[in-house]
Amino acid sequence: MSAVLERMDFRAEALRIGGERVRTARSIDVLNPYNGERVGTAPVAGIDDVRRAFDIAHAYVPRLSRYERSAILNLAAVLLRARTEEASDLITAESGLSKKDSLYEIGRVADVLNFGANEALRDDGQVFSCDLTPHGKQRKVITTREPLLGVITAITPFNHPMNQVAHKVVPAVATNNRMVLKPSEKVPLSAYYFADLLYEAGLPPEMLQVVTGDPREIGDELLTNPQVDLITFTGGVSIGKYIASRAGYRRMVLELGGNDPLIVMDDADLDKASDLAVQGSYKNSGQRCTAVKRMLVHEKVAAAFTARVVEKTRAWRHGDPMDRGNDMGTVIDEAAARRCQQVVDEAVAQGARLLAGNRREGALYSPTVLDRVRPEMTVVREETFGPVSPILTFGSIDEAIAISNGTAFGLSSGICTNRMDDATRFAKELKVGTVNLWEVPGYRIELTPFGGIKDSGLGYKEGVQEAIKSFTNGKIFTLPW
Ligand code: NAD
C-alpha cells in the first residue's frame, strides 16, 4: 500500500447520515484487485439506516444562495486538485485502474465541480411576451427552475469510482436538492472521500448522505421510499430495467450499458484510426460504457488497420496499477477478467482469430485483439466490459450502418473518414446518442449532453447542464407587464 493510503484512515468507515458518521454492526472489506490487500472497510447499511437518511433529507430545506453553492463546489475543486495524488491513489487501490487512468479521472471530477459551480450562477429562466398573435395580451411569461419537492436517489457503478458519483452529486448541489447516494459496493471508498470533500467545503450534510451495503437488501428501499421523487441510475441494463419495473410514479434517469463501434472507412488515415482504436478500447481497462467494443473496418483496409492495432496493443503496457509506467491496470475483479477470457475463448472456438492477448493472471487481463469476428458472437452481441478489441469487416457503408445498429444498445460511436457525405450519413442513420467524427466514442466534456437510447438509456441526457434540467421542476409565472 502506498504511503499516502497508509496515512488515510479507511479501516473503520461509517455511513454519512445527517452529519453523523454512523458505524454499522456489519461491514465489507474492500480489496485491492491487483494484490488482494485490504484497502479499507465499508459499512453495511440496513433498511432502517436508509429510511433515516430519507427522513433527514426530506425534513431539510436547503437555503444556499447561488453564490454559496458555487463557492462550495469551487472550493471542493481546489481541495481535490491539491490532493490529486492521494485521491488518485485511493481510486487505483480500490478499483485496480492504473495511476494514469485515476489521475485523469481526478482531473475530470474537478472539471465537473467547476462546471457545476458556473452553472449554479446561471439563471436559466426565460421571459416571453404574450402579445405575439392577434389574440395576445399585454402579459409576460417567466420560467424558473426549482429543486424537486422530494429526495433524489442516486445509484452509481464501479467503473469511474469518483466521476460517476460527481456527475450525480454536483448537479444536485448546484440546484439545492437533497440526495441519498448509494455508490457501488465494489468501490465505496472513493464515494465517501468525495462526499467528505464537499462537507469540508461547506456543504450541509443533510443535502448529501451516503449509504453503502448489499443492494439486494437496501435496493428496493432506495427505489420505493415514499420520499423519493427521482432516481438517477448509472449501471448495467439488467439492474436498470429492474429499477424501471420498481420505480412507479417517479422520474427516472437511466444511463445503461453500451456496445459502441469505431467505424473505419477505406479512406481513413490508418495511423490515426488505430491510435483511436487502442485508446478507446484499453483506457480505463476497457471498462467504460463508451469504450470501443466493436471495431468495424472496411474490408479494403482491414489487414493494414489490424496490423497497426496488434502492434499498438503489444506496446500497451499493463501490470501493477500503481506503477506509473503502466498504461493499464486490472479489471475490477478476477470474475470480470474470467468473463472476458470466456467470451474471447468462445469466439475463437466459433472461428474468430486471436491475434494478441487473452492472458489472465488474477484480475489482470491483457489487452486482446481478435479478428474474423461475426456480429452474432457473444463478444460483440453483448457488452464485453474489459480490454478486448474485436475486429469485424464490412464492404459498404450500408453494411457498416446495419452492423452498427444491429445490437440492443445505442450509446455512442466513433467514425474515421474524411468523406463528408459518409460522415453525414453516419450522423443521421446511426441509432445512438452520440456520433463523434475522428474521435473515440467516449469523447465528451463534462458539461455537454451525454446519454444513450434503446437499451443504453431512456434518452435523457447527463452532463452537468442536462442533469440540472432533469433534477429540477420548471415553474411558470405569468403577470401583466
Ligand atoms: P451494475 O448494474 O452491476 O451496478 C450498478 C449499481 O447498481 C451498483 O451501485 C449496484 O450496487 C446497484 N444495484 C445492484 N442491484 C441493485 C438493486 N436491486 N437495486 C438497486 N441498486 C442495485 O453495474 P456495474 O457493473 O457497477 O457497472 C458497469 C455497467 O455500468 C456497464 O454496463 C456500463 O456500461 C454501465 N455504465 C453506463 C454508463 C452510462 O453513462 N451509460 C456509464 C458508466 C457505466
Image: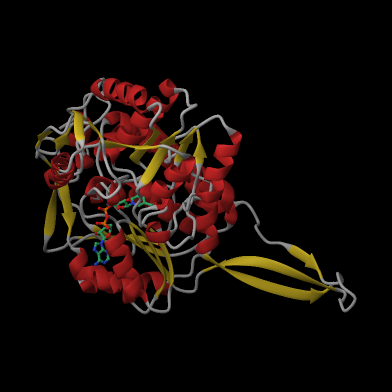
Q: Quadrant of residue 427?
A: top right
Foreground residue among 174 and 379 = 379
Is 251 on the left or on the right of 84, as rendered? right
In this rendering, does residue 197 appear at all? no
Q: Residue at x 26, y 40 (%)?
A: 373
Foreground residue among 391 and 101 = 391
Is 391 on the left or on the right of 8, as rendered? right
Foreground residue among 465 and 119 = 465
Q: How is the image coloured?
A: secondary structure
How many callouts does the rendering have? 0
Foreground residue among 402 and 388 = 402
Location of residue 117 in the rendering, given as x and y in whole percent from the top left corner: 54, 47
Q: Residue at x 58, y 46 (%)?
A: 118
Q: Residue at x 26, y 73 (%)?
A: 220
Q: Residue at x 28, y 51 (%)?
A: 381
**Above or below, comparing residue 98 to residue 31 in the picture:** above
Quarter of image, ligand 1: bottom left
**Above or below, comparing residue 388 to residue 134 in the picture:** above
Q: Quadrant of residue 78?
A: top left
Location of residue 196 in the rendering, given as x and y in whole percent from the top left corner: 34, 49
Location of residue 370 in the rendering, given as x and y in whole percent from the top left corner: 24, 33
**Above or below, comparing residue 184 to residue 63 in the picture:** above
Q: Quadrant of the C terminus?
A: bottom right
Q: Quadrant of the N terminus?
A: top left
Location of residue 319 in the rendering, given as x and y in whole percent from the top left corner: 18, 27
In this rendering, does residue 178 appear at all? yes
Q: Quadrant of residue 424?
A: top right
